[in-house]
Image (cartoon, rainbow, N blue to C red):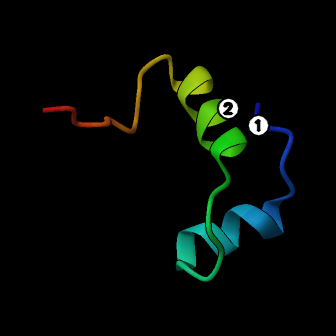
Amino acid sequence: MLGKKESEISKWMRGTHNFTIDTITSIENALGTPILQIATD
C-alpha cells in the first residue's frame, strides 16, 4: 500500500531509518487516520 520496499520498512521498525514527511502522509492515508499531531498554543 505504501510502495516501499520491505527492507526500508524493516529499517523503520528497527529505528535505524527516519520517516520523510511524504512517507508519514502515505502511512496516514493507508491507515485512514492521522499519526502525527502538531500542537498549537
Mark 1 vs mark 2, foreground winner is 2
What residue would you read off at disc 1?
A: 2
**In this view, which residue lies farthest toward the top?**
32
Q: Amino acid at mark 2?
A: Ser
Compare residues 36 and 2 and report the one nearer the observer: 36
- x%, y% of residue 3? 86, 39
* In the displayed structure image, the side of residue 39 where residue 30 appears, left or right: right
Q: Is residue 8 left or right of residue 41?
A: right
Is the residue 6 above or below the residue 35 in the image?
below
Give the label on residue 21, or none. none
Vertical position of residue 14 compared to residue 30: above or below: below
| Sequence-first tag of 1 and 2 | 1
Circle 2 — which element? helix
* Cα gap from disc 1 to disc 2, whole angstroms: 6 Å
Q: Residues within 10 Å of mark 1 (few under 14, many from 20)?
A: few
For the N terminus, the quadrant is: top right
14, 28: nearer the viewer: 28
Label 1, secondary structure: give it: loop
Q: Amino acid at mark 1?
A: Leu
Residue 8 on image: x %, y %: 78, 66
Instruction: Point out residue 27 in the picture as x, y percentages from the top left corner.
Output: 60, 35
- Position of residue 1 relative to residue 32, above or below, is below
Outermost residue toward the left in this view:
41
At 12% from the left and 32% from the top, the residue drawn is: 41
- Which residue is depicted at the point 61% across and 83% down? 16
Label 2, residues with CA under 10 Å away: few <14, some 14-19, many ≥20: some
**Percent position of residue 39, x then y:** 22, 36
Location of residue 21 (image quadrant)? top right
Q: Which mark is residue 26?
A: 2
Residue located farthest toward the front when viewing the structure as drawn: 41
| Callout 1–callout 2 Cβ contact below 8 Å | yes
Name the residue at 31% across, 36% down.
Answer: 38
